[in-house]
Image (cartoon, rainbow, N blue to C red):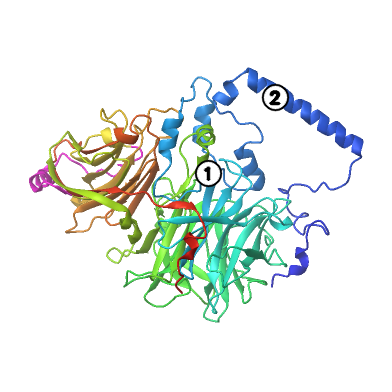
Amino acid sequence: MASNEALLPVTSRQDPLSESRSDQIPETRRRRPIKVHLAIYSGLLLIALYVALIVTHDGSTAQHGAKDETSTESRARLAGVSEKSNDRVSKLSDDRKVEAFAWNNTMLSWQRTAFHFQPEKNWMNDPNGPLFYKGWYHFFYQYNPNAAVWGDIVWGHAVSKDLIHWLYLPIAMVPDQWYDANGVWTGSATFLDDGSIVMLYTGSTDKFVQVQNLAYPEDPSDPLLLKWAKFSGNPVLVPPPGIGAKDFRDPTTAWKTSSGKWRITIGSKINRTGISLIYDTTDFKTYEKHDTLLHQVPNTGMWECVDFYPVSKTQVNGLDTSVNGPDIKHVIKASMDDTRIDHYAIGTYYDSNGTWVPDNPSIDVGISTALRYDYGKFYASKTFYDQNKGRRILWGWIGESDSEAADVQKGWSSVQGIPRTVVLDTRTRKNLVQWPVEEIKSLRLSSNKFDMTIGPGTVVPVDVGSATQLDIEAEFEIKTEDLKLFFDDDSVEADKKFSCETSGGSTARGALGPFGFSVLADESLSEQTPVYFYVTKGKHSKLKTVFCTDTSRSTMANDVVKPIYGSFVPVLKGEKLTMRILVDHSIVEGFAQGGRTCITSRVYPTKAIYGATKLFLFNNAIDATVTASFKVWQMNSAFIHPYSPDDLSVPSRT
């Protein structure tokens, strides 16, 4: 059992990890003479003034976004977490031969989303402890109240009746104790048997040790859960022997074992092996660590934000986290610290010893062939069981792809993806399917229905007016004669190497693709973001379909990373090719084949903004004629604003 005896504040005793951890920050609490302090402070002040003069005199430092030793990267490394800024953009910005793009306020103001959740200003990252309680959906999130860059992390808090319209509430938790002095980090909520809530979260201590802490609502009768109390015996868990002080974070929602105990898993690593530790508890204050691991995968690095939950093999509804049985599979998801990718795998959970085995080891968590929730910009995701509607809902943090300097200029950074339902694909049984929550349809306004046949090498404007906020649902069919000619052509070999990322994007023409939509485009197509299918010949002369988003021409700006995203998507016999695209200013979310493959991208047009934003349908195939049947809705803006007494007068449901 983990004892709290060894968990006294470090101000009164030696940190139990200090003798065995070489990566900790040494404690320096001995008082120094006042004169020494004055001398040090005076010297630092002079240095600061000198640096300020240099930066003011030579504008290249600020202009190109160069970062000094107090930058986001340095703070994140010191704390032992992933880099929270865009390293690839930083390298572009630090190239003195490249002038930073001259963003203006008109461009930057357009980038703010209209129906995706984001704070009023400043930085946001991981979703935390989502839940439904007394008629309200609660969303907590990692938040810096002081700047548009990572740091000073607290728990932001918002509530909603429908997961679309949100009220900002006061900050839920701040780093005000020794055990979370350097950040109130990611955590999860658990409903106990009596309906009460406990929250486990990671704290970064005053010595940058990652520990797990317990919090709970001060007033359980308050449907808004405005005030949270931290357990007086925190931390309840510290890194166990063999685990680095900075490699122990992000506790999951707890689930019930067959013996009636609660069980959680926490992400970590041993050398280069990513692991998920297992603990049992009866009171969330003391814990028993298992000698076995829930799972481990060599050469995958640190596992962040581990998630673990059941899915039904026979039904399309969500399941409470504690459900188990013969018709149940279990999903493990881990966010890969090294690659910034969320990987998941489906397998079998053994309650007796707390272990999990993948159905297919060749696509295990974290390896290059592993399944992903999303093949674009999507990280630190978290699911919760919505007992209100019997569904499992997935949240995901959508970071930026522009420069940190641009984020500072616009005053905010990051959004959350539209919440998605997640279930096992009952047709393939090999993957999950994700779909935007049904409530998003409440924002649909006017719609247009189209039926178009487009020949090879064709681009057609789609007249929907302004195309800044759209919901598009489409079906595609390749002309039967073209498919027959393709299969009968012995010169066409199976393409085993095609991938969205490396095969040239939407301009690379093949016999049967690419075809789809160019969103967030200007009239001349100098800026555009194509979302498309590409069909090739796979093994045994079967069609192989990939779903891609090409951001390489999405903006004229040079301080933006513009990748080509995508992956294979299963298409079963008798199915048409289907896609859905949500467009909301600087974010595009694509869903292929009912959500078997999903792609989220961030784009930053300079010309295709406001009324100049257009929509195009294209077919860049060499040989195929494609029929497209689709519907396009203009989308209203969500009501996302600070709460007021009038907002909170709505009667709650239990």
**Residue 121 disc label:** 1
Q: Is residue 272 magenta?
A: no
Give the percent coordinates (x, y) of residue 632.
23, 48
Residue found at the very far bottom of the displayed protein: 259
Location of residue 69 in the rendering, given as x and y in whole percent from the top left corner: 66, 34
The magenta stretch spans which residues? Answer: 476-502
Q: Quadrant of residue 391?
A: bottom left
**Residue 496 at x, y percent in the picture:** 29, 45
Q: Which mark is residue 51?
A: 2
In the rendered image, residue 210, in percent from the top left (x then y), is placed at 66, 55
Identified by mark 2, the residue type is: Val
Residue 18 occupies quadrant: bottom right
Residue 337 in view, yes or no? no
Q: Disc number at residue 329?
A: none
Identified at 68% across, 62% down, the residue is 240
Q: In the displayed structure, would residue 460 be above or below residue 208?
A: above
Q: Secondary structure at mark 1?
A: loop
Q: Residue at x 49, y 28 (%)?
A: 92
Q: Nearer the viewer, mark 2 or mark 1?
A: 1
Amino acid at dot 1? Lys
- Report the quarter where the N terminus lies: bottom right
Looking at the rendering, which quadrant does residue 459 occupy? top left
Q: Earlier in the sequence, mark 2 or mark 1?
A: 2
In depth, the one of 612 and 338 nearer the eye is 612
Q: Looking at the picture, does residue 528 appear above or below residue 313?
A: above
Mark 2: which secondary structure? helix
In the picture provided, is 543 more to the left or to the right than 188?
left
